[in-house]
Amino acid sequence: MDSNNPGPTEWAEGRHGVGPWALEHPGVQAPVDKRYDPELLAEGDRRNVVDAYRYWRREAIVEDIDTRRHPLHIAIENFENDANIGTVVRTANAFAVDTVHIVGRRRWNRRGAMVTDRYQRLAHHEDVAALLAWAQERGLQVVAIDNTPGSVPLETAELPRDCLLLFGQEGPGVSDAAQQAAVMTCSIAQYGSTRSINAGVAAGIAMHAWMRRHADFSRSW
Ligand SMILES: C[S@@+](CC[C@H](N)C(=O)[O-])C[C@H]1O[C@@H](n2cnc3c(N)ncnc32)[C@H](O)[C@@H]1O
């Protein structure tokens, strides 16, 4: 990113958003660029967006993120209405993942997403078979993430670039059908007593493993 753009160290100041442009920038003409939203300029911008996107229209933000999207897709099974999907969507947004695929129930709890779903491409598939067919058509390799017998350590696995990471839900984990169709199942090393970690946390770890291997960190905020 351009070093003149706001970065992590400046984020604390903008945590609660910004007021109307005229109050924030007295005597400075408001931008007329079509990326800016006249209503936000007039009333202030309290959204959970990085400072570089303050006062921008939602469509303009999505278009800009699209220039940095990764060929990484995330899927999560939602047969029992998993409460972690919001967290997964928020992390996928942070990493500019291509699409988050919800498999099973269409409805999911948006609370953890903190409105990040407005800037993230989402797709729905009735079942795992439909998801797998979709992935195959697009040449995406499906990697299941679970700590089941036969899994290989995520820490040393070579994650493919054009990839769909598939997560299970609390309780059943990744379904057998999905694991059988996947090129591999990767587990995250654990050392304590719990059988598994939270699915949202596991998704963050696995997405970051892909980022470390394939992302261009010079383009991050
Ligand atoms: C809470 S786990 C439930 C299933 C788990 N296999 C069990 O025995 O309890 C829900 C999902 O989180 C992810 N997950 C949790 N812990 C993991 C680990 N150590 N390695 C890989 N994935 C994990 C997987 O996607 C899993 O399907």
Image: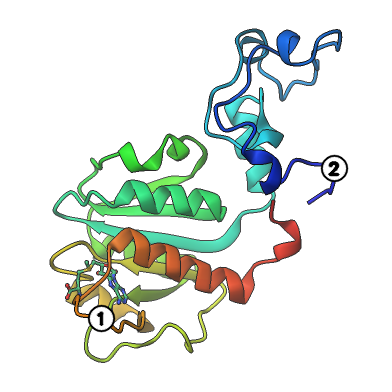
Q: Residues within 10 Å of mark 2 (few under 14, many from 20)?
A: few
Point 41% across, 68% down: residue: 165
Q: Compared with residue 111, is residue 175 higher up or lower down, i.e. above or below? A: below
Local secondary structure at mark 2: loop
- Where's residue 103, x and y in %? 27, 55
Q: Which of the numbered marks, if any, corresponds to residue 192?
A: 1
In terms of image quadrants, where is residue 19? top right
Ligand 1 sits in quadrant: bottom left
Disc 2 residue type? Asn
| Most foreground residue, 198 or 175 | 198
Residue at the spot 27% in from the left edge and 81% down from the top edge: 147
* Location of residue 91 with respect to 132 vertically, above or below: above
217, above or below 113, in the image: below
Query: Viewer-proximal residue, 41 or 194?
Result: 194
Q: Quadrant of residue 192?
A: bottom left
Where is residue 30? Give x, y as percent. Answer: 80, 13
Residue at 69% x, 56% y: name it: 220
Upstream in the sequence, badge 2 or badge 1? 2
Indicate the secondary structure of the residue bearing disc 1.
loop
In the picture, measured across the screen, residue 59 lies left or right of residue 127, that is right
Specify whether residue 133 is in view. Answer: no
Q: Nearer the viewer, mark 2 or mark 1?
A: 1
Relative horizontal placement of residue 71, taking residue 218 as reference (left or right): left
Residue 118 picture location, percent across and down: 47, 35
Residue 95 at x, y = what percent?
55, 56
Circle 2 is placed at which residue position?
4
Give the camera-side residue of 147 and 123: 147
The colour scheme applied to this rendered structure is rainbow
The amino acid type, in three-letter code, at marker 1 is: Gly
Tell me the residue at 13%/65% (across/down). 171
Residue 47 can be seen in this image: yes
